[in-house]
Amino acid sequence: MVYPTKHSFLMQCLTNPKEFFCNRVSRRMQHASASASASRPGTAAAAENGVIEIHSLDEWRSKWQAQSNSNKLMVVHFSAKWCGPCRFIEPAFAELAAQFKDVAFVTIDVDELEHLASKWKVRAIPTFFLLKGRQVMHKIVGAKRNELERKIQMVINQSTAA
């Protein structure tokens, strides 16, 4: 049965709600997977803003090994795509990456790498770890841009003073 365009949405829902719901969910899932695969490269790479996105344990191990062998500061941001405060702090995180060129900025999605988030005892997001070598210098929980910037500057100043 063909319905007028204006009422097709309502009529489809009323005549067969189960099929209508399944079709809507299927379309949303297809859209979500298409946009996720388009927005995510296959390997960890520095984005235009200087933030490296980690999508696999192998990528993390590689980055962690490089970090462990250097004396460079690394800021690790645990976040999720659905998290409002995480989306709020992303532009500020990118600005900090542009401001502090000698610091490695890394983002890890807790939904993609649940095991890693669990290992680091991430209980709330966003969570930031400031790492130097294998040592955690600071941990910041919440979208606190000023505190994050202050702690990064403090670790940098400690390094130059030493």
Image (spheres, grey):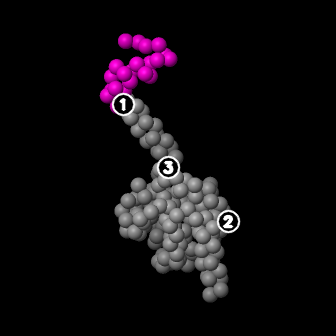
Point out the frontmost of discs 3 and 1. 1
Mark whose residue sits in front, 2 or 1: 1
- The picture places residue 18, in percent across and down from the top left corner, at 32, 28
- Image point (57%, 55%), residue name: 88
Callout 1 crowding tier (Cα within 10 Å): few <14, some 14–19, many ≥20: few
SS assignment at label 3: loop
Q: Indicate whether residue 156 is drawn in magenta.
A: no
Task: Find out whether the residues at labels 2 and 3 contact each other: C-beta distance under 8 Å.
Answer: no
Q: What quarter of the picture does the C terminus occupy?
A: bottom right
Q: CA distance from mark 2 to mark 3?
A: 24 Å
Q: Is residue 77 left or right of residue 123?
A: right
**Is residue 105 in view?**
yes
Res 40 label: 3
Tell me, for residue 80, which label it has, or none: none
- 7, above or below 138, in the image: above
Relative depth, front residue between 2 and 10: 10
Question: In the image, what residue occupies the spot 36% across and 62% down?
Answer: 115
- In the rendered structure, which amino acid carries the disc numbered 3? Arg
Q: Which residue is mark 2?
A: 99
Is there a contact, CB below 8 Å, between mark 3 and mark 1?
Answer: no
Report the amino acid beneath label 1: Phe
- How far across and how far down the image is residue 156, in percent? 63, 77
- Percent x, y of residue 53: 51, 58
Magenta-drawn segment: 1-22
